[in-house]
Image: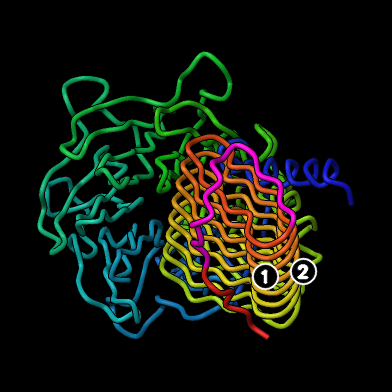
């Protein structure tokens, strides 16, 4: 292959990496899977599921209202356990609605017609109650018909009390703190609110159903802004009920009367829609009365689809960017291995793996096979192992070794240290001050942006420093250098960590 063609291919790969990094900003969500096989009383059956929550491990909690229970599933949608219909009153619900899980794994259930909040530990063992069982009321110690519920990072508990048109706030011990609602001005007056969410900054989001709007307050309960009742259809809500906020501050609204999910950015600007506006249905593209909504740490979106008796799961579309970077669709890989938002240790198989680390400082070993590895944000350590691998570090200061095979490697953002390993590799440092060593083989190396130190190693290498003040050493072989200062003293590479 001549040099001109090689450069064109490498430019395409760099563009593909950029598309992957930008994918979450521009793509629409796509359907992934369903939990629920219809109306019934079995473990995978629901009778009007109204809410859904997801914990830090990815376990899924469903408010199965007319079955008077909470069903719990693992991250793959496999049934685990049930809370409700127990032998003693604290385990007996009457029309449960909202469900939430805190950082410790404690489970909070809005038990509507018992006028109480029931709290259980992560094993489903009863802990405590907020409210007075079977006694509706309007003072600080009572609820009329509690519905939506949320728990913030400090453990404070937010309860939607629709018939009292208020949000009641309690500390982690269940002691009353304050109320939002029934104020003197319209922005503090609700009309049968249904849902509540709290973001990482402590801002409070209320689905004000009867007023067709989302009201946003700061952590002190001071009004900030409104979404809804806008001039164009995407800003016009019809009976919004469920609400969620993701780690980026994006806002997800179950717009029940319009049978859709509306997604807005942190400033309240419309981004996208899930579902078909005004069209109920039962296929994967439609809802029939969506209610509760949750977003997990990986960006999966969970929707309680009441009249279809199911939970629908969506993600922002990553099929096209994965195909662009990996060169093949996901279906071409033998195994897909997903990390979490934490610090993961992931090992591939001896086949062709698709491995995605997501957030956190991950340690990933592709082992044998032609793998596609995406580290995600964080300071990752990635070893491609044997095979022709495609590796992207993404954000963070990553340490990447291609291992054996003709690898394509991008460090992404951050100050990365990259070793191509054996054979003929194509390496892009990405943004940041990178140290790249081609090692053995005829390598093509570009530093991209930043002040980079690039070493070709053995072989006939092509090195382009990119922008910045770059220093290059072609190493052994017939080498071509550009956009850098030749420096024979540079040798920043380490020996490749090959896996046989």
Which residue is rendered at x = 68% and y = 36% of the image?
276
Marks 2/1 in contact by CB < 8 Å: the verdict is yes
How many residues crowd mark 2 within 10 Å: few (<14), some (14–19), many (20+)? some
**Residue pushed farthest right?**
1
Give the side of residue 334 with respect to residue 65, left or right.
right
Which residue is more in the foreground, 406 or 340?
Answer: 406
Number of marks in the image? 2
Q: Residue 174 location in percent, x, y? A: 14, 61
Residue 302 seen anywhere in this rendered image of the structure:
no
**Cα distance in 3D space between marks 2 and 1:** 7 Å
Residue at x 27% of width, y 50% of height:
159
Q: Residue furthest front?
A: 488
* Residue carrying label 2: 333
**In the image shown, does 469 or 302 lie closer to the viewer?**
469
| Range covered by the magenta-colored residues | 478-493
Residue in the foreground of this view, choosing between 368 and 125: 368
Q: In screen coordinates, is 244 left or right of 3? A: left
Q: Say which residue appears at 35% left-offset and 74% top-offset.
A: 92
């Amino acid at each position: 292959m001549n040099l001109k063609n090689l450069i064109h291919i490498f430019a395409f790969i760099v563009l593909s990496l950029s598309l992957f990094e930008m994918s979450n900003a521009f793509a629409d969500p796509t359907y992934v899977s369903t939990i629920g096989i219809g109306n019934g009383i079995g473990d995978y059956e629901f009778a009007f599921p109204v809410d859904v929550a997801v914990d830090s491990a990815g376990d899924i909690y469903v408010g199965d209202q007319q079955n008077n229970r909470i069903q719990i599933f693992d991250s793959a949608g496999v049934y685990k356990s049930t809370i409700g219909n127990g032998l003693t009153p604290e385990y007996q619900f009457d029309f449960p609605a909202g469900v939430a899980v805190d950082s410790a794994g404690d489970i909070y259930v809005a038990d509507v017609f018992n006028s109480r909040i029931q709290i259980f530990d992560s094993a489903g063992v009863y802990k405590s109650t907020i409210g007075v069982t079977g006694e509706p009321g309007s003072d600080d110690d009572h609820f009329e018909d509690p519905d939506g519920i949320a728990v913030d990072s400090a453990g404070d508990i937010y309860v939607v009390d629709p018939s009292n048109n208020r949000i009641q706030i309690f500390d982690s011990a269940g002691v009353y703190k304050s109320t939002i609602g029934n104020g003197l001005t319209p922005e503090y007056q609700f009309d049968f609110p249904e849902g509540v969410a709290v973001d990482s900054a402590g801002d409070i989001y209320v689905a004000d159903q009867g007023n067709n709007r989302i009201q946003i307050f700061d952590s002190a309960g001071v009004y900030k802004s409104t979404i809804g009742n806008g001039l164009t259809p995407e800003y016009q809500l019809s009976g919004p009920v469920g609400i969620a906020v993701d780690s980026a501050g994006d806002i997800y609204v179950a717009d029940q009367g319009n049978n859709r999910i509306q997604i807005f950015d942190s400033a309240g600007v419309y981004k996208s829609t899930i579902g078909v506006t005004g069209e109920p249905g039962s296929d994967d593209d439609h809802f029939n009365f969506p209610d509760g909504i949750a977003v997990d740490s990986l960006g999966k979106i969970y929707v309680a689809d009441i009249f279809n008796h199911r939970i629908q799961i969506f993600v922002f579309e990553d099929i096209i960017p994965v195909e662009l970077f990996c060169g093949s669709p996901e279906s071409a890989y033998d195994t897909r291995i997903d990390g979490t938002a934490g610090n993961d240790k992931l090992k591939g198989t001896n086949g062709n793996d698709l491995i995605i680390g997501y957030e956190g400082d991950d340690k990933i070993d592709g082992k044998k096979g032609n793998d596609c590895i995406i580290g995600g944000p964080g300071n990752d350590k990635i070893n491609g192992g044997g095979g022709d691998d495609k590796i992207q570090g993404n954000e963070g200061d990553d340490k990447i070794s291609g291992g054996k095979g003709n690898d394509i490697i991008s460090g992404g953002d951050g100050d990365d240290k990259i070793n191509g390993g054996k054979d003929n590799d194509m390496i892009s440092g990405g943004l940041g001050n990178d140290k790249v060593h081609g090692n053995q083989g005829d390598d093509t190396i570009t530093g991209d942006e930043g002040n980079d130190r690039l070493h070709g190693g053995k072989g006939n290498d092509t090195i382009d420093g990119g922008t910045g003040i770059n220093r290059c050493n072609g190493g052994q072989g017939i080498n071509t250098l550009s956009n850098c200062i030749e420096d024979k003293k540079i040798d920043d590479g380490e020996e490749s960590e090959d896996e046989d």
